[in-house]
Amino acid sequence: MNLEFLPYGRQAVDEADIASVVDVLRGDYLTTGPAVTAFEHDLAKAVDAPFAATCSNGTAALHLAALALGLKAGDTIVVPAVTFLATANAAYFVGADVVFADVDPSTGLMRPSDLRAALDRAVAHGKKVKAVFNVHLAGQCENLEEIAAIARAACIHVVDDACHAIGASWGGKPVGDCRLSDMTLFSFHPVKTVTSGEGGAVITRSEVLHERVRRFRNHGMIREAEHFTDHVAAFDGGLPNPWYYEMHEPGFNYRLTDIQAALGRSQLVKLPKFVARRHELAQEYDEKLAKLAPVIRPLARTPNCSPAWHLYIVFIDFASVGLSRARVMNDLCGRGIGTQVHYRPLPFQPFYRSRDIATTYPGASSYYDHCLSLPLYPAMRKGDVDRVVSALEAVVRS
């Protein structure tokens, strides 16, 4: 019997989502229209924040955050060593530099002590740290109050890279409310909890940052008359010319389409259901993998966080089972089980290795040496977790 292949993640799109997209296709606007405005309104409401600006993807959200903060050449951003390329690349998009922070080997998350060590190392090398981009890996976060307090004491901005964590909460408050950060960033890639196909968002409580993000996502265009500087060209008889706009700083075309926004808005309605289903699956994994401990153990849980599991990550003692990670992944694939590694630490990447000011990251190294992401998505059916665990047991005990 040929069993369905189980990827590590996938979207969950239903007929209501499809109908929402079709409605836009039959309407008057395909991009930057009422669907975008409605999605932004609903998104801000969902995370209890006043401002949400959508954009083309999570990478664009990171870039827009760096632009909105005015980061530039000579500035430095602290980034956890374990994250996707885009988190650190955003610094280089604006000419800034990166200092990496080590992580907890049992969670992959930057701890307050890791942030302090990275700041001390940056100061020792004469670097001007202006921001920390704190990553909520796999859908959970680490001591946001203490990280915010360290940042305030150092007079640096906090940007939460929550591309994995929409629907999570910290201290009973939704991730994205920006009580403890300047901005929070989301991604709506298909494997994320909510998808718009591709898409991202920048959440903030600052009207100034919000307007800068909106401006930079649309070529840097300014249409508000109160911000015009070339008054001779801008006004006719005291009234602004209806066709007129100015550009004071160059921006980008990072807009979200109405087609994508319609899908995202429809998906957002199902966010509580998606998060609850991911919790159920994670709990089932926890229970059924217990028999394989300590050779296989799940990602550690952080206190005070209710995660929105984007990934289900386990740690495998590959040395004790006498198998390489590649062998385990290939054998699982042969049994119809897809897996992935999230992530190779960024200081190990050739581009960053040649620019890094540290030499070792024991937490990130230990995390990376053992991590593996197993299938996790709401459309998984009854028996799928059993199938994954059974396949994993067969492989490591073969």
Image (tube, rainbow, N blue to C red):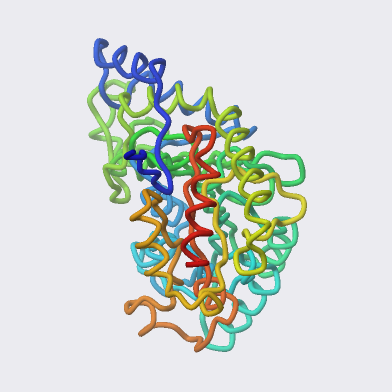
| Residue 367 vs residue 177, the one in the foreground | 367
* Residue 285, above or below 105: above
Report whether 28 appears left or right of 277.
left
Compare residues 393 and 180 and report the one nearer the observer: 393
Decide if residue 230 is on the left or right side of residue 383.
Answer: left
Q: Residue at x 38, y 25 (%)?
A: 263
Residue at horizontal 50%, vertical 72%? 368
Corner quadrant of residue 317: bottom right
- Res. 80 image quadrant: bottom right
User: So how many labels did they put on this image?
Assistant: 0
Say which quadrant the N terminus sits in. Answer: top left
Residue 66 picture location, percent across and down: 44, 57
Q: Residue 224 in the image: state x and y as whole percent.
A: 38, 31
Residue sitting nearer the eye, 156 or 350: 350
Indicate whether 237 appears above or below 23.
below
Q: Tell me: residue 175, above or below residue 225.
A: below
Q: Residue at x 33, y 55 (%)?
A: 334
Residue at (37%, 64%) from the top-left corner?
Answer: 89
Q: In screen coordinates, is 141 left or right of 372? A: right
**Which sits in the foreground, 390 or 229?**
390
- Judge from the rendering whether residue 288 lies leftward or rightward of residue 63; answer left or right: right
